[in-house]
């Protein structure tokens, strides 16, 4: 299972047209005219979290499994 965060309703295939449309509409279509954080929140539906980046760089330990 790939380690990624995201919506719990994952597509059956790698390419999901609905997600591609949201990416185009919320990220690419702004052409840099929109604040990057606002574009991210519109696309992901939540504020950005730095945990994955910090973990990948060795600055944060992985959370224990429940």
Image (tube, rainbow, N blue to C red):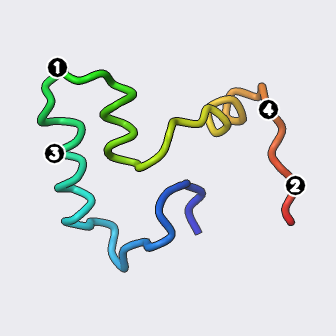
Give the distance between the C-alpha atoms of the residues marked 4 and 3, in whole angstroms: 33 Å
Give the distance between the C-alpha atoms of the residues marked 2 and 4, in whole angstroms: 12 Å
In the rendered image, the vertical position of residue 64 relative to residue 43, given as above or below: below
In the rendered image, the vertical position of residue 28 relative to residue 10, given as above or below: above
Disc 3 + disc 1, Cβ < 8 Å = no
Give the class, few, some or many, for how many residues have Cα within 10 Å of label 4's Cα (few <14, many ≥20): few
The residue positioned 55% from the left and 54% from the top of the image is 5
Where is residue 56 drawn, in percent x and y?
67, 34
| Residue under label 1 | 33
Residue 63 left/right relative to 28: right
Residue 60: assigned label: 4
| Residue under label 2 | 64
Give the distance between the C-alpha atoms of the residues marked 4 and 1, in whole angstroms: 33 Å
Number of numbered discs overlaid on the protein picture? 4
Q: Between residue 45 and residue 11, name the one nearer to us.
A: 45
The residue positioned 80% from the left and 45% from the top of the image is 62
Give the class, few, some or many, for how many residues have Cα within 10 Å of label 1's Cα (few <14, many ≥20): few
Residue 25: assigned label: 3
Where is residue 17 drawn, in percent x and y?
19, 65
Task: Quarter of the image for the C terminus: give it.
Answer: bottom right
Residue 48: assigned label: none
Mark 4 vs 3, N-terminal side = 3
Circle nearer the viewer, 2 or 1: 1
Residue 37 left/right relative to 55: left
Disc 2 + disc 3, Cβ < 8 Å = no
The residue positioned 40% from the left and 48% from the top of the image is 44
The residue positioned 43% from the left and 71% from the top of the image is 10
């Amino acid at each position: 299972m790939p380690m990624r965060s995201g919506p719990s309703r994952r597509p059956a295939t790698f390419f999901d047209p609905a997600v591609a449309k949201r990416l185009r509409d919320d990220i690419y279509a702004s052409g840099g005219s929109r604040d990057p954080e606002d574009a991210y929140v519109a696309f992901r539906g939540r504020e950005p979290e730095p945990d994955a980046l910090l973990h990948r760089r060795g600055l944060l330990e992985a959370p224990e499994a429940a």
